[in-house]
Amino acid sequence: MFDLLWQGMVGMTAAKYLVPLFIGTLIGVVGGALPGITITMTVIVVLPFTFTLEPLQGLAAMIGVYVGGETGGLITSCLLGIPGKPSAVATMFDGFPMTKKGEPGRALWLGIWASILGGLLGAIVLVASTGPLAAFALKFGPWEYFSLFVLALSMVAGLVEASLVKGLVAGALGLVVTILGNDPVMGAERLTLGIPFLAGGIPFLPVLIGVFAFSQVMGEVERMGGAREAERMAGKVVSFSVSHLKILFEILSRPFLLLWSSFIGLVIGVLPAIGGSAANMLAYDQAKKFSKHPEKFGTGVPEGIISSEASNNANVAGSLVTIMAFGIPGDAVTAVMLGALTIHGIQSGPLFISQNAQLAYGMFAAYILAHPIVLALLFVGVRWVIHIVTVPKSILFPVVLVLCVVGAWALSNAMSGVWILFIFGVFGYAMVKFGFPLAPFILGVILGDQIEINLLRAVMTDSNPWLFITRPISGVLLLASVLSFAAAIWQHRRAQRKAERNGDADF
Amino acid sequence: MLSRDGWGGFAVLAASLLLFGLTLGLKDNPLVPFGPGFYPRIVLGLTILLSLWLVLADLRRKKSESKPEKLNYTQIVLQFGVFGLYCAALPYLGFRISTILYVAAANALMDPPRGARGWLRVAALALITAFATYYIFERYLQVLMPRGRWTGF
């Protein structure tokens, strides 16, 4: 394992990999820092540039975006009081007050160093656990895969912040998208509604790009005007110089906080589609609960920044574990990575590491090396990033949507991809307006084909349906799915009762 | 009376029922035990049940009066409209001309230009975006961008 990792690290330092990783990280830092531009949107913008690259070059760029974005988001959170992305919201609670107290450098570098340390702690788990988890997943037959995908969907539907039933409806809608086209056994056309380009099914990448890019861009267009505020406040930022040894000591003198926050981030990253924003908030909440002075949280305490930033970077490692070991995207960013792998004809899943060891360890290396690159970039250019975030959204958004069109077109050099992008853009925006969560929908679209194939394989191998329950791993996975479902119902009921008590009956 | 959730559930219910009806017309293949409609019926059956649950839950729920947030929906309609026209124009005008027109229109709608300077900004953004994207993708990344039937490029 260490030999392969070392080879991966050495390979990644070659210019042909290091350059995409560096550029990806730089774009990630800027995209993460831009309020209203999420990491998902940034990675979607980068995706078409990776089509003609080698798989590892493309994945290195995307991993760079992911790691850079998670760290970049804290810049505007700490300095401007505007979270660059949802997973930096909790960072703002103490980062911005610290800046207002006249310590912008301390706020910023506490966050950056905590991100780096949290991310590297996550790397240890990523490297150590992905292989054994994938080896375990090799024991899976179609029954276990089916149950695993059902578990992933039920967890995502249950854990989203919107109502449970809406999460489930969204997941089911994602599955509906995958039944349009042709059946996987005989290739018979089904439910094409007379639309010619539906005959081959709906490719998931234009759906994913459309749903996420449009919902986010249009969500911001509804409330245009934030950039002016950022522009006004950016002028106030003064000096970022600090003693880095002192900052590192401040973080490392709280080892439990760093480890616990990173652990929370990792676990949430491993669970599909919950994401960095939940990790960020949960770690902040835990830090407050374990603190001897919880009343000081929100006034600019270092614990608030360390916990939230360590967790959201460790969350990236968790997401990579899930996609590399099981082929299940942990969030939208890894869903795009899955798309990039598919474009290059590489199948993710338990066989991924054994069949593509060089690529897998190259990805580990890219993840690890992205951290010092982020650090170096921010040492040099943090002041520049603050100026870049003042670029008006009226300039950014048309450019982002043009790149989405290029991405959708380049997949098959056909207009069908562009139309799917547009149709699902409208659909995604409508889903958001009706309060349906997007994460279960996308997971449904991604897993739908695999659920069908494994269900059919299982029942064609042995028509006894009880095997789904009596085979131990499959049974445990289905039981976990039922438990997760029950826990979600209990949690939602409790939240509803609480809301009713507070006089807010609607959800 | 249905609220936002109820109407959402109702729309999903109607679409699922329609698709479920269509699966009944799918013919089974004698060579395989399960025909092309087997899995879609499970998925659509599940969607019907869930959307029905959503509608019923909405009907049973006490509604609270909440003031809707004031949002710029005219801008949304315009942006979707312009993007739809962009998609429609791509095969006829080609990537470069349609992208110039789209970026200029989208930017001008989001931030209406004031005076010559404003129009210069719109024109510069549109030209730079279209030609930089074209140049990078077509020349360096070997992605053949859409050609226009009317323009020939």
Image: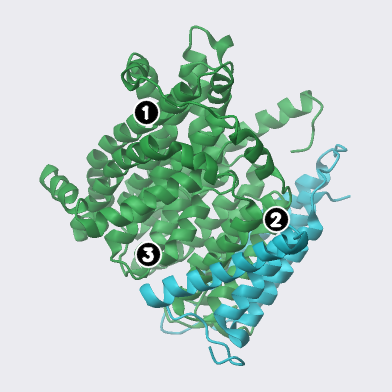
Chain colours: A green, B cyan
* Residue identified by numbered label 1: A113
| Image height of B98 relative to A318, above or below | below
Check if mark 1 and mark 2 are on a common chain: no
| Image height of A440 relative to B109, above or below | above
What is the x, y in percent for residue B11? 75, 62
* Residue identified by numbered label 3: A50
Disc marking residue A362: none
Q: How far apart, in angstroms, are the residues tagged by discs 3 and 1?
A: 29 Å
What is the x, y in percent for residue A109? 41, 27
Q: How far apart, in angstroms, are the residues tagged by discs 3 and 2?
A: 39 Å
Host chain of mark 3: A
Picture residue at 55% right of the left edge, 11% below the top? A294
Q: Nearer the viewer, residue A72 or B59?
A: A72
Check if mark 3 and mark 1 are on a common chain: yes
Picture residue at 35% right of the left edge, 23% below the top? A259
What is the x, y in percent for residue B122? 67, 65
From the image, which quarter does the C terminus of chain A lie in?
top right
* Residue identified by numbered label 2: B51
Residue B12 occupies quadrant: bottom right
Host chain of mark 1: A
Q: Seen in the image, is A339 located left or right of residue B123?
A: left
The amino acid pointed to by label 2 is Ser
Q: Is residue A317 visible?
A: yes
From the image, which quarter does the N terminus of chain A lie in?
top left
Camera-nearest label, 1 or 2:
1
Q: Crowding at label 3, few (<14), some or many (≥20) Cα neighbours within 10 Å? A: many
